[in-house]
Image (spheres, rainbow, N blue to C red):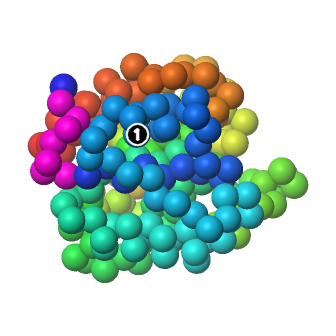
């Protein structure tokens, strides 16, 4: 599997707090020469308008078509962006790999910082997408992940019990994730 294709670029979209040095997203950034991280002005107090605008600007600035790789709150950012993006920008997205969506509508106080991202659009996404979920994710129930994938018209992958599939999971390069990404790229004809 060759990820150094010049036919597209990977845009990595970390969730709240960014992705640390050991996070699989950071590890993957080092593997793919055609990859970049979409930076946010405030990783700890995310603003949906700003996060969506930065994703929009990154897709707009990309010289080639893109594959979006989102984790946590960035999965919701991606879905909200797709619901209102211009058609020419949506056409630049060849696929989206969305891992560990955050349930921004959860009423628990620990979700207060992400609740401004609610409500989540529950419409079919216009590009091939894979939603990846853990059965013991503290930020979203497995059932909610399945419901989102169904509403978004995406493929769905159950990766067992990996928590929030982030920094704490210590996945390194996460070989299972790379296999899942490769399958998505194959289905997208990349």
The residue lying toward the viewer, choosing from 100 and 3, is 3
Q: State the residue at coordinates (26%, 52%).
A: 9
Q: Return the x and y of residue 174 as percentages of the image width and height.
A: 45, 23
Q: Return the x and y of residue 18 as percentages of the image width and height.
A: 61, 49
Q: State the residue at coordinates (70%, 70%).
A: 116
- Magenta span: chief secondary structure: loop
Q: Return the x and y of residue 93 as percentages of the image width and height.
A: 26, 60
**Secondary structure under the numbered disc 1 in the rendered image:** helix
Tag 1 residue: 29
The residue lying toward the viewer, choosing from 157 and 60, is 60
Which residue of the protein is positioned furthest toward the right in this rendering?
109
Instruction: Give above or below for 104 relative to 4.
Output: below
Instruction: Give above or below for 87 relative to 114.
Output: below
Residue 24 visible in image: yes
Instruction: Give above or below for 6 relative to 137.
Output: below
Identify the magenta region. Answer: 2-8
């Amino acid at each position: 599997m060759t990820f150094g294709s010049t036919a597209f670029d990977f845009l990595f979209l970390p969730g709240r707090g960014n992705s640390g040095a050991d996070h699989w997203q950071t590890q993957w950034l080092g593997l793919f020469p055609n990859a970049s991280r979409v930076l946010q002005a405030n990783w700890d107090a995310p603003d949906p308008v700003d996060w969506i605008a930065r994703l929009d600007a990154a897709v707009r600035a990309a010289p080639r078509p893109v594959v979006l790789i989102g984790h946590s709150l960035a999965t919701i950012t991606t879905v909200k962006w797709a619901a209102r993006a211009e058609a020419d920008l949506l056409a630049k997205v060849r696929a989206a790999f969305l891992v560990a969506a955050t349930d921004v509508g959860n009423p628990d106080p620990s979700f207060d910082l992400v609740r401004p991202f609610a409500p989540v659009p529950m419409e079919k996404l216009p590009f091939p997408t894979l939603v990846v979920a853990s059965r013991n994710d503290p930020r979203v129930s497995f059932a909610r992940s399945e419901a989102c994938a169904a509403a978004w018209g995406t493929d769905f992958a159950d990766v067992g019990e990996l928590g929030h599939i982030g920094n704490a999971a210590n996945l390194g390069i996460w070989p299972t994730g790379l296999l899942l990404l490769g399958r998505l790229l194959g289905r997208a004809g990349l």
